[in-house]
Every structure is written in C-alpha cells, then in structure tokens.
Image (spheres, rainbow, N blue to C red):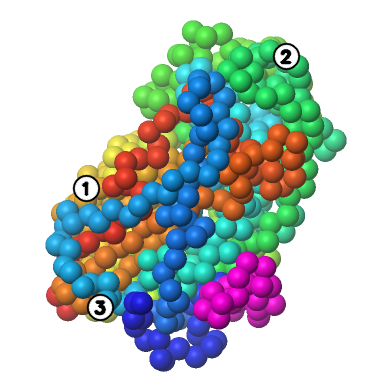
C-alpha cells in the first residue's frame, strides 16, 4: 500500500475540503468492507462538501487499497461478434497498465516507497449539445463525422452517467488515495449556446435538465425530418443508417427530450474553456449578430447539395473563413429550403463575460470551489486562464488556447504567454511546486495565428512554442488536454503530454490521474481510463435514463463516419509515466 504525504496532519474539515465528503464516504465503505449498496448509502448520508476554495489544499489522506473495479483495468465495452453492420456491445477484456520509461528509468521497489502527491479526474470534450439548434451543421455529415452523430441527442444522459461513475469511485486506482477534484479540459458545450452552458453547469453541480429546445412538446430536428441522410429512429423509413443495421426504436425521440436528473459531482471541480465554448459552431469568430439571429430563429437548414457541403467543409477545415462570411452567404442563399421550427432565445451564443458570470453564479457552486477556477478578477480582466492549488506540493495552471479570431485550432496570445512565464518563474524561485498544465488544445492542434480582434497587434503562439516554454521549466510534470477526441500520450523531453478521448465519440472516456513521488529520483504519473456507469449491454426496450446512457455509448461505436483509432494504442491508455524528479522538489 502506498504512503501518503501529510496524512497525519489532516483534520476532518481539511480532508473534506480537499477530497469532497461523499467521495471520502465511498472510500470508507471500501476500507471497512461495505460493498455495493451499503457503500452508496454511506456516500448519501455524508456531510456536504465544504464549498469554499481552501487557501491551501492538503495532499490526499492515507490511502485505501488500489483497485480496478469500475475502471478499464477491469473491463471495457467491446463489440460482440464479427459480422459487419450494427454491432452490440458487451463486457470485454480489460486494458492492462503499460509502464513508459521514455523520460526516466523504472527502478524496482518503487511501488513500496511511493508517496501520493495528487489524485484527480479529467473530463474532456463532453459536447453537451442542443441537437435542434439551427446553428448545427448536420448537412455536412458526409464530409465530417463531427457534423452529426446518431448518438448526440443523448449527450446529457451520457454525461450524467459519467458523473455517476466518478461519484462511485473509491479513490485513485493506482494508489487508493481519495480523489481531490475533477477538471474539464474544454468543449463542455457544442454550439457556444446559453442553453447548453446551463445544461453543463446543472449536470456538474446537480439538478434537473430537460434536453429540449424550441417546441416544449416535441422534438424538431434532423431525426424526424424524413431525410434518409440521418437515422430516423421512430420511423420505419429505411434510412442510410438503418441500411447498416441501426434499429427502429419507437419512442426514442420522446425519451431523448425527457427530463434527466443529475446528482452533480460530489467532488470539487474546475473548468477549462474550449473552442466550442467560445466560438459559434466551434469555429467562427464571436460577436456577429447574425449567429445570434440564426441560433434563436425559426429556420433550420437540414440538407445541402453535396458539392456545396464539400466546399463549406473545406473552408472550415482549412481555416479559410474564420469569421463565417462565406457561411453566412450560403445560409442566406438556402433560406427558403430551411425547415420551419420553433424559435428559442435560450439558444443564443454566450459571450466570454457571460461564460464567466455563469460559473461565478453562487447557485452553480455545488461542491466548489466558487467559480470553478474562475474569479472576479478573471471577469474584470476578461481572461479565461488561472492557477489553482492541486495539493501542497502541486500547482495547476488552466490555459485558454482558443483563438478569438476564429477557426477550431488553437494558440495563445502574448499576454497569456508572458503571464505563464511569470507563473513558472515564480515557482522556480519560490515555492518550487510540481506543475500540471491543463488546456483544451494539444500541441499538435495549436497552429492558428489568426489575430485576436480585441488585441489585433498581439502575436499568437502555437503548440511547439508552448511546449518549449513548458520544457524550460523543470517543475512541469505534465500537460493535460483534449480536443483531438483521441487518447494520445507524448513525451516532451522533461514532461508528458496527456491527451484524452472525448465523451461524445466512442470510446467515451474520462481519465483518472495520480501523481506520486517514488523516492528514487523519479515521479510517476498514473493515468487510468474510465467509462460511464451505464452498463455495456444495451436493451432496445429500455429507454430509461440509464438505458439511454448505455445506448449513447453503443450508438457512438456504430456511427458510420466515426474514426476507429480514437481509442489510441495501449501506450496511450492505462499507463505509468515516469519522469525525473527535479532537484529541490
């Protein structure tokens, strides 16, 4: 069993503030042999977590035993049978842990010496999506899988099931140390929509969500359009997806817009911004009133000639239209072909200030911290980057890598880069903490040099330059991100870049991360993937909240246009990543 720093110094209040009371209760259930329902009851009756952000965060308390249950170390959703077409999922073989010594040697006996420094969870690319929004561009389906997915109407049920999984975990699977927090690494929403932001904050903090917009009585979107381009689940129409084996599920759309209850995370959580949170459609520069008129209006374009769709997607992919001028002309040209739907003001894109204010709303504090990393200073200074205490000896840095000039790839401006360099220098000459950096974009996807309209003369910096800055600071252990929707772990000389798959595309994962000191001149970063709490097997007759969450996963596996490499290699999944421990830390 691992030894944990400062365990004896923890009083009960500090422990609750650092780990979340309910998570602690679940761990106690494991420690004292309470199984299943009894452990859940212990979590239910635990005192509420302290909502205020502590000035310092203690290292995790003494651990319980390492475990595998509830993680991909125990089992993974796997397709049954080898026939082509729609395939059902079932319990499959676990993914083992791979030791990666690219940056430091793996010394024997480290498992008996190690001390846990941090234990937390990463969510990324949740893409809570209002599928009925006119701002959606489903008509590009033939060009890109991200334009429309057969599972996306169930994104709320899927995210709530992921929250249920995290709430049930007894701690970090490698050390058993209690989990301290959850951090999202962007694309929490899909259309930069006020309604989607409300759904995200409610899911994370707890409450009821009705994943519907427009007409409160019925669904109005591409899945009841009668168009064969999209899966029509309630209809007997032999659409393109049914030809591949997708089921006819009577009542699916009514179930998809039914109210969902989220228990909210029992752990404190932090928020990082992504391009879909900042830019209309995830790619167009904000501030144009046209996008507000389109999103809130009563016309939705659902089909487009193939040649025009290809032209639009090329412009988006290559960043040729960052302000959406050509996109606007196309939509206006096809206005008469657009479907009439019920207008909804809640679909309006939100501004940076509105994003910050929503996080700072006391009603959204949940288990804390207030603002979820963002502060009143962030609002006053119009910035979406900040630092936060991971533990006594670990600092977290959350960056804003979205380019306000438009396009879905990222960069950071001069002002943010100088701020980052100051923070890293202070750590080098002061506290000397280990540093974990969080962002939405990966080093490979920070290639955008469009000028920021608010700072037109400010230089933008890409991923290679950011990696160089991080590599120059010996305290940086890892850069943790998302955006690519793919598990990918890359060594950068002195630190690791950990990119995690999304929770909208298969394999729909989150990642538990544990940082430990091996007391042999090395640190280990354990990364363990987890699925939602929904069962691997689906039942087409079960359209309950849990049944929909299971179907969300299975539909994502079968999405015809979906990439099959997003799961990554075994070296990108469950791993122990070794890195040299900087002198003096």
Q: Residue 428 shows which numbered tag? A: none
Task: State the extent of the magenta-drawn residues as a range.
Answer: 24-51
Label 3 packing within 10 angstroms: few (<14), some (14-19), many (20+): some
- Which secondary structure, mark 1? helix
Q: How many marks overall?
A: 3
- Which secondary structure, mark 3? helix
- Which secondary structure, mark 2? loop
As measured in the structure, the alpha-carbon distance from the residue carrying label 3 to the one carrying label 1 is 36 Å
Instruction: Give the mark nearer the N terminus: 3 vs 1.
Output: 3
Circle 1 sits on which residue? 465
Circle 3 sits on which residue? 113
Circle 2 sits on which residue? 237
Instruction: Give the mark nearer the N terminus: 2 vs 1.
Output: 2
Q: Position of residue 543 (x, y in %)?
A: 74, 40
Q: Main secondary structure of the magenta part?
A: helix
Q: Position of residue 480 (x, y in %)?
A: 35, 54
Residue at horizontal 35 percent and vertical 40 percent from the top: 568
Look at discs 3 and 1 and give the one toward the viewer: 3
Q: Position of residue 300 (x, y in %)?
A: 68, 23
């Amino acid at each position: 069993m691992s030894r944990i720093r400062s365990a004896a110094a923890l009083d009960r209040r500090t422990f609750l503030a650092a780990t979340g009371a309910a998570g602690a209760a679940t761990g106690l259930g494991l420690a004292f042999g309470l199984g299943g329902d009894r452990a859940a009851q212990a979590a239910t009756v635990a005192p509420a977590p302290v909502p205020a952000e502590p000035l310092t965060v203690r290292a995790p308390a003494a651990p319980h035993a390492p475990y595998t249950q509830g993680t991909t170390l125990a089992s993974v959703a796997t397709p049954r049978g080898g026939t082509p077409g729609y395939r059902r999922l079932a319990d499959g073989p676990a993914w083992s842990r791979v030791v990666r010594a690219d940056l430091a040697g793996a010394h024997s006996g480290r498992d008996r010496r190690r001390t846990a420094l941090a234990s937390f969870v990463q969510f990324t690319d949740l893409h809570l999506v209002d599928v009925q929004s006119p701002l959606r561009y489903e008509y590009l389906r033939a060009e890109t899988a991200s334009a429309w997915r057969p599972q996306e109407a169930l994104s709320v049920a899927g995210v709530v099931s992921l929250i249920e999984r995290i709430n049930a975990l007894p701690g970090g699977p490698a050390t058993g140390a209690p989990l301290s927090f959850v951090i999202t690494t962007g694309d929490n929403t899909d259309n930069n929509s006020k309604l989607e932001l409300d759904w995200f904050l409610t899911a994370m903090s707890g409450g009821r969500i009705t994943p519907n917009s427009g007409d409160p009585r019925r669904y109005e979107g591409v899945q009841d359009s009668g168009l064969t381009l999209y899966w029509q689940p309630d209809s007997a129409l032999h659409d393109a997806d049914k030809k591949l084996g997708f089921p006819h599920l009577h009542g699916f759309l009514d179930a998809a817009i039914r109210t969902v209850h989220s228990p909210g995370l029992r752990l404190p959580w932090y928020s990082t911004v992504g391009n879909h949170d900042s830019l209309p459609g995830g790619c167009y520069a904000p501030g144009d009133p046209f996008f507000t008129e389109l999103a809130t209006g009563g016309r939705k374009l659902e089909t487009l000639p193939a040649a025009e769709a290809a032209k639009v997607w090329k412009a988006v992919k290559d960043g040729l239209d960052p302000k959406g001028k050509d996109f606007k002309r196309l939509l206006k040209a096809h206005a008469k072909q657009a479907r009439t739907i019920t207008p909804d003001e809640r679909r309006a894109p939100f501004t940076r200030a509105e994003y910050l204010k929503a996080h700072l709303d006391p009603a959204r504090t949940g288990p804390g911290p207030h603002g979820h990393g963002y502060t009143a200073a962030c609002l006053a200074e119009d910035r979406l980057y900040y630092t936060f205490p991971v533990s006594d000896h670990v600092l977290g840095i959350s960056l804003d890598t979205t380019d306000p000039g438009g396009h879905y790839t990222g960069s950071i401006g001069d002002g943010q880069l100088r701020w980052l360099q100051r923070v890293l220098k202070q750590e080098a000459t002061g506290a000397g903490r280990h540093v974990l950096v969080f962002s939405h974009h990966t080093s490979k996807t920070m290639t955008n040099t469009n000028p920021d309209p608010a700072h037109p003369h400010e230089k933008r910096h890409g991923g290679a330059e950011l990696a160089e800055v991080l590599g120059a600071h010996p305290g940086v252990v890892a850069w943790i991100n998302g955006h690519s929707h793919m598990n990918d772990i890359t060594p950068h000389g002195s630190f690791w870049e950990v990119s995690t798959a999304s929770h909208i595309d298969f394999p729909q994962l989150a990642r538990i991360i544990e940082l430990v000191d091996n007391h042999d001149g090395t640190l280990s970063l354990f990364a363990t993937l987890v699925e939602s709490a929904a069962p691997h097997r689906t039942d087409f007759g079960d359209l309950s909240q849990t049944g929909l969450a299971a179907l969300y996963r299975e539909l994502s596996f079968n999405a015809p246009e979906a990439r099959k490499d997003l799961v990554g290699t075994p070296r990108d999944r469950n791993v122990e990543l070794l890195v040299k421990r900087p002198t003096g830390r």
